Amino acid sequence: MTQVTMTVNGKSVSGDVEGRTLLSDFLRKTLRLTGTHIGCDTSQCGACVVHVNGRAVKSCTAFALELEGAEVRTIEGMANADGSLGTVQQAFQDHHGLQCGFCTPGMVMSAAALLADNPKPTEAEIREYLEGNICRCTGYHNIVKAVMAASGQDVAAVAAE
Amino acid sequence: MPKDSGIGAASKRREDVRFLTGKGKYTDDINLAGQAYVHFLRSDVAHAKIVSVDTSAAAAMPGVVRIFTGDDFSGVGGLPCGWQVTDRNGQPMQEPPHPVLAQGKVRHVGDPIAAVVAESAAQARTAAEAIEVTLDELPPQIDMAAALKDGAPKVHDELTSNLCYDWVFGSDDAAIDAAFSGAAHVTTLDLVNQRLAPNAMEPRVAVGDYNDAAGDSTLYTTSQNPHVIRLLMGAFVLGIPEHKLRVVAPDVGGGFGSKIFHYAEEAFCTFAAKELKRPVKWTASRSEAFMTDAQGRDHVTKIELALDADGKFLGVRTHTMANMGAYLSTFAPSVPTYLHGTLMAGNYTTPAIQVNVKAVFTNTVAVDAYRGAGRPEATYQLERVIDKAAREMGMDPVEIRRKNFITSFPYATPVAVEYDTGNYVATMDKLLEMIDREGFEARRAEAASRGKLRGLGINCYIEACGIAPSALVGQLGARAGLYESATVRVNATGGLVVMTGSHSHGQGHETSFAQVVADMIGIDENMVEIVHGDTANTPMGMGTYGSRSLAVGGSAMVRATEKIIAKAKKIAAHLLEAADTDIELKDGQFTVAGTDRSVAWGDVTLAAYVPHNYPITEIEPGLEETAFYDPNNFTYPAGAYACEVEVDPDTGKVEIKGFAAADDFGNIVNPMIVDGQVHGGIAQGIGQALLEDCRYDETGQILTGSYMDYAMPRADDLPFYQVDHSCQTPCTHNPLGVKGCGEAGAIGSPPAVVNAVVDALQRGGMSHVTHIDMPLTPSRVWAAMQG
């Protein structure tokens, strides 16, 4: 076991990890930040996406030990300071971009990373960017719409929610 | 005007806040003090005799608490099947035992041989690798036709063959023979409705706990119906009475049918927790999900449609082989029979219909209900054969359907169900309005100018939802009632808690159910809290599947709320010194009819709990009521769907250019949620049509055992959908007039996609292409184009 220290959602945290401990396990099991979900074994589903140093990362592909000193942001750190939903989160609620909620944390983290890079993505750009996040409930319609809305685009013309 | 609250309002979902902030509580988020972890050692071959299982080396590994094998379960029951189908000769289906851990034989890849409980999940996994298993491999039965041959090696030695049942349903031989012998035209189609993996994004999890002092067991599990699990596991497997067994299904990350069933891992964790006097947790990997979650579809069908010279349907005859897999999952026998055969009339007046289904055991993962469950299989074959018939007879695919629509209701079909309401003309008209069919030729020509083949597929669907009248399903072999229950508890200060036996795992019940109750009383939705998913604090429930929650669970809630209102009116009458028959409730105020004398909801609820001025000799204090609702028919949502595609003639790749759905769900409580349900269903249907295929090789190895190989629909595979549910013929027999919307999208969409691709190729001059089996991958489409 080796101690690792990183900043998670603005707070400095430390924990003992094995060399094989994944960031996803560190978040879920050591820090009990269970908003980050595990949906597959092969880094395909994207339910575990978090931000590491500002970039979207599948937390099941990163070793905790390699992230000494890193800035990590999870779904628990996405609300506004006053506790209200952040822009992407609010857009997901407004446009019914989630159903069972299991893929949602990863979906929100990916969408937020996309908008940080590309503030006004097209529908096609959103669909391509979210290719690594699988949702089984929504058929993606309202997710894509929510991301467009979160970027300030008028989605009234998009077919019904 | 859209409403802003209550029934009909697009109220935003209250459950979203916790899901969007990482505060959802899923089963894997539950960690109990002192919990141990189990890892299942699973068979890596499809069919073998277990010669020996040596756990001695593994038992000595670090952290191992105990290793269990099939022998440890010899004193408990097997996993029960909840539906007994009777075959064409009046005999019960063949029903093999299903042990919690394999005994004597393994019957599919993934069958559990041993279970290692250890201090950590990693230790359990590591120790499992040290178990020495000797297997004597047997010939696996993978192909259904081969498994049915005389002398084929048997999946279950104690049965007479691999045939579970041979079932015939509908019109008698004389009627069906007459229909076909008198036909001007007969269209025949052989097709495969391929096996699918449900793939809820949350893998299954079970945490067993045991309270030594009280002798109580608790199971936390990823279930769509915790009460059903309590009943099946308690009564049939472990012998724990219901008052000593609590089952909790907290936030559940999608189900789609796969979390209806009682699974071995649930029984194991409950059993082991009691044996070890400590909590035992299991979290499935995605690989385990592909090896153990009940899969869907897997029908091989021949359908024949008899028509007169004008295109009127005279008869439908089908022969289907339905794969059961290695064991009978909880509702498996009902899916190809009563959820499939009963829908073979579709939206049409076909007078003679006969359905034959042979259910087959194979060395594959069990097959059971997956979104739609039998109804997609019925719809697909019927709507495909109609399309083929229209083409053969030179008729328009819409006109041939219109010519055969049922237009008078109630309508009793030749396959034992009675549709209460519907308007198939209206949904077809609405669909045509949505898709600009007149403009199709111009779009086709434009696509052709880019070298693409464009096609349009249109079809109808009907489904039977709101499952189900208990007496009827009992006659058909169900071993359970299919009512639902609800308790409405009004608190002294006027807020309500509704405890429902329905379970929400994405459907948004916490929002839509609250809309209904708030609307009935005329109070703010936020005064109503919905509680579900815990047998300890909800009344008996049959759970959520078959698009039944609002139609059956919602009806129970309405009945309980009606009782509340009736009692509250008596209290109000006392306070207002009037007769209770003169009391009206509107907008949360009780008023003496025709006067301005009124008392508020909150004053009445307070009086119920502080009964100082109260009709105490007539009614009890308090305000809490329970209702059980047993439907007297199924509901029959129906609609018309259209898909427009472009096919790349060089590669066979299909691109969806447009998808439209016109549904009749009866009355709508929350249109936003309904739209979302349809979207998700369509995506699963398109996934089946173009991408998904659960494949086994000839030895029974799962070739599609991860997301590297099983093609889940992703955002860039799918378009925006046009959905409409303005055609509404309310259900006539439930108090809300609702029909259910959860499965429609998955039922109506596969034939639309395949019809569209065949249409594209036909218009492109490939008249030899009359059918392509799903999924329509580029290689399959390209091969079909080559002839």
Image (cartoon, coloured by chain):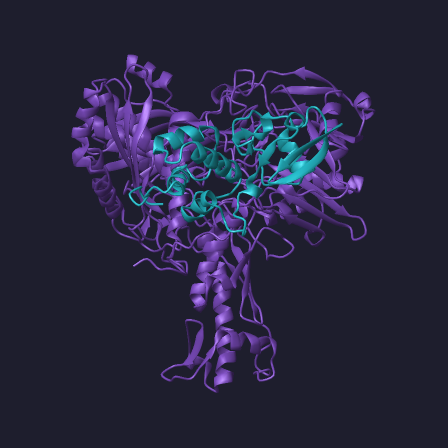
Is A38 placed left or right of A117 in the picture?
right
Decide if residue B482 is on the left or right side of residue A3.
Answer: left
Above or below: residue A145 compared with residue B630: above
Q: In which quarter of the image is residue B121?
A: top right
Q: Which chain is cyan?
A: A
Residue at 55 percent across and 20 percent down: it is B141
Q: Which of B146 and B590 is in front in this view?
A: B590
**Which quadrant of the rendered structure holds the C terminus of chain B?**
top left
- Position in image of residue B293 (x %, y %): 56, 33
- Image vertical order of residue B332 relative to residue B532, above or below: above
Chain coloured purple in the rendered structure:
B
Q: Residue furthest top?
A: B786
Q: Where is residue B335 in the image (x, y as percent from the top left)?
A: 47, 38
- Image quarter where the N terminus of chain B lies is bottom left
Q: Quadrant of residue B718?
A: top left
Q: Which residue lies furthest to the bottom in this view?
A: B577
Judge whether B535 appears above or below B448 on screen. below
